[in-house]
Image (cartoon, grey):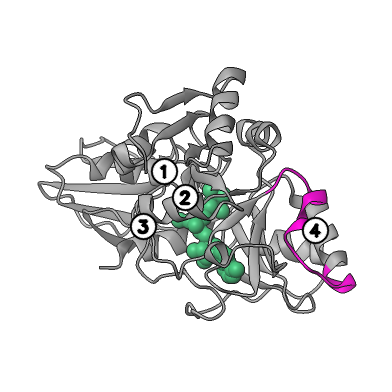
Amino acid sequence: MDALPSKPFLTGDEAGIAEAAAHLQAGKCVAAPTETVYGLAADAFNEAAVRDIFAIKSRPFIDPLIIHIHGLEQLAKLTSTTTEQDATIQLLAEAFWPGPLTLVLPKRTEVLDLVTANQSSVAVRCPAHPVMRKLLQVSNLFLAAPSANPFGYISPTTAQHVRDSLGDRCPYILDGGPCEQGLESTIVDLRNPATPVLLRPGPISRSELEQVLGRSAPSPIAKPDPTLAPGQLERHYSPRTRLTLHAVGKLPPPLKQEAQIFLQRPSGEIEDSQYWLSEDGNLKEAAHNLFALLHTLDDQPEIVDIHCEMPDTATGVADAIRDRLIRASKR
Ligand code: TXA
Ligand code: MG
């Protein structure tokens, strides 16, 4: 990697996007906003640039990357699909693209083995964030982009989170404001389109997928299977501070140096150590705020323990919140 600029932030306007696109075309990495989390982007067909993504994140090469496209018409450059797969892709893309849905499909040989961790499949997503869409358009590149955090740490939902966690290792950060969803995309494996598999719960819920597919739910995997879903680690998205999970209404009384996270604003008098993810328990809002609050608390050295309520239902985005909290709490 070359010498780094002292000012990494680029504004998410036309000039900033043009500069980011030029850096990407020159084989540099750029952190960029998406509607889910910030991604660390590079030209997916430039091997040296993709290698830098892994280096900046300290990510092991066994963990494959998602490639971002501007529209469905670009998919054929990356994937080699059957008519049956095409019909399912069409349904899902019409319903959810651009948006927080990633599809795993058989890859074309041209897609770098480095991107797919030597697998015969590739993960593809068409993001909705206007700045990312513009960046894809202006750069005219396929952008490989994992979340822009050090491997295993909390994902970034603002440009400042990227700066704080990757520091000088990330040369450019395109600022598109806070991410709307706040959790990574839903990933569906369509290699066998008769039985789609939900590899990672996300903003698009299992029931939403089910409705569009018009058939039995994609089966989420109970335990990460490295052959099916590489990179889905039991410990992930983790703050440095210890995180302990509790049923709703069962948070222990706060002790000194502890923080409490409620799903909704608690009634009565509020202590300094009490935080909440949503005013009224709205789970979309909770998802949006979750990683940002974990970043804030993790940056306070006086807090040594975080106790957090966990949604008790597994419907809608609650499934994704539970998934992230469980992984974040693992030691
Ligand atoms: O919302 C998102 O998806 C964000 C934004 C930046 O787009 N990206 C993201 O990337 O979450 P990352 O690298 O943090 O997660 C990618 C995960 C991998 O860890 C792996 O589990 C799965 O996607 N994946 C990628 N390629 C795959 C493949 N060929 N087969 C199965 N799973 C794959
Ligand atoms: Mg990630």
What secondary structure is found at the residue carrying circle 4? helix
Does ligand 2 reach within 8 Å of label 2's beta carbon? Answer: yes
- Disc 3 vs disc 4: which is toward the camera? 4
What amino acid type should be assigned to the residue bearing mark 2?
Ser
Residue at point 35% right, 67% down? Answer: 235
- Disc 4 vs disc 1: which is toward the camera? 4
Q: Nearer the viewer, residue 136 or 259?
A: 136
Residue at point 79% right, 54% down? Answer: 93
Task: Classify mark 1: residues with Cα within 10 Å, few (<14), some (14-19) or many (20+).
Answer: many
If the image is split into quadrants, where does the C terminus sit? Answer: bottom left
What amino acid type should be assigned to the residue bearing mark 3?
Phe
Question: Is residue 325 visible to the viewer in this orientation of the structure?
Answer: yes
Residue at point 30% right, 38% down? Answer: 167
Q: Tell which circle, 4 or 2, labels the residue nearer the N-terminal end.
A: 4
Rounded to the nearest angstrom, the CA distance separating label 2 from label 3 is: 9 Å
Residue underneath mark 1: 156
Q: Nearer the viewer, residue 131 or 157?
A: 131
Q: Which residues are magenta?
A: 69-85
Does ligand 1 reach within 8 Å of label 1's beta carbon? Answer: no
Residue 7 position by quadrant: top left
What amino acid type should be assigned to the residue bearing mark 4?
Ala
Q: Position of residue 141 (x, y in %)?
A: 66, 43
Residue underneath mark 3: 151
